[in-house]
C-alpha cells in the first residue's frame, strides 16, 4: 500500500508473456486491475459504470 491509499503490484512474467503484455498495454485504451482477484482486464468497463 502506498501513500494516500494507492496500490502497487509487481507482475512477474517470462519474456514471451512480457511481449504480449506490452502489446496489449500499448494497443488497448482501457485497462483495469482487479485487486481482489489480482487480474488485469483489457477493454472492459468496471461494474457500475
Image (cartoon, grey):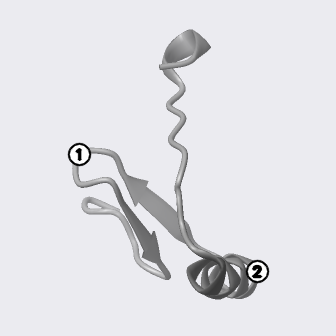
| Residue denoted by label 1 | 36
Residue at (49% x, 82% y) in the render: 43
Q: Quadrant of the C terminus?
A: bottom left
Q: Nearer the viewer, residue 42 or 47?
A: 42
Q: How many marks?
A: 2
Mark 1 lies on a secondary structure that is loop
Q: Is residue 35 above or below residue 45?
A: above
User: Marks 1/2: CA distance?
Assistant: 24 Å
Q: For the residue carrying disc 2, how many other residues have a C-alpha within 10 Å: few (<14), some (14-19), or many (20+)?
A: few
Position of 19 with respect to 9 (left or right) is right
Residue at (48% x, 78% y) in the render: 42
Q: Is residue 38 above or below residue 4?
A: below
Q: Is residue 21 above or below residue 2?
A: below
| Residue denoted by label 2 | 26
Q: Nearer the viewer, residue 30 or 22?
A: 22
Mark 2 lies on a secondary structure that is helix
Residue at (48% x, 18% y) in the render: 5
Position of 35 with respect to 36 (left or right) is right
| Quarter holding residue 18 | bottom right
Amino acid at each position: 500500500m502506498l501513500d494516500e491509499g494507492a496500490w502497487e503490484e509487481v507482475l512477474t512474467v517470462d519474456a514471451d508473456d512480457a511481449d504480449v503484455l506490452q502489446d496489449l498495454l500499448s494497443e488497448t485504451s482501457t485497462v483495469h486491475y482487479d485487486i481482489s482477484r489480482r487480474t488485469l482486464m483489457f477493454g472492459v468497463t468496471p461494474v457500475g459504470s
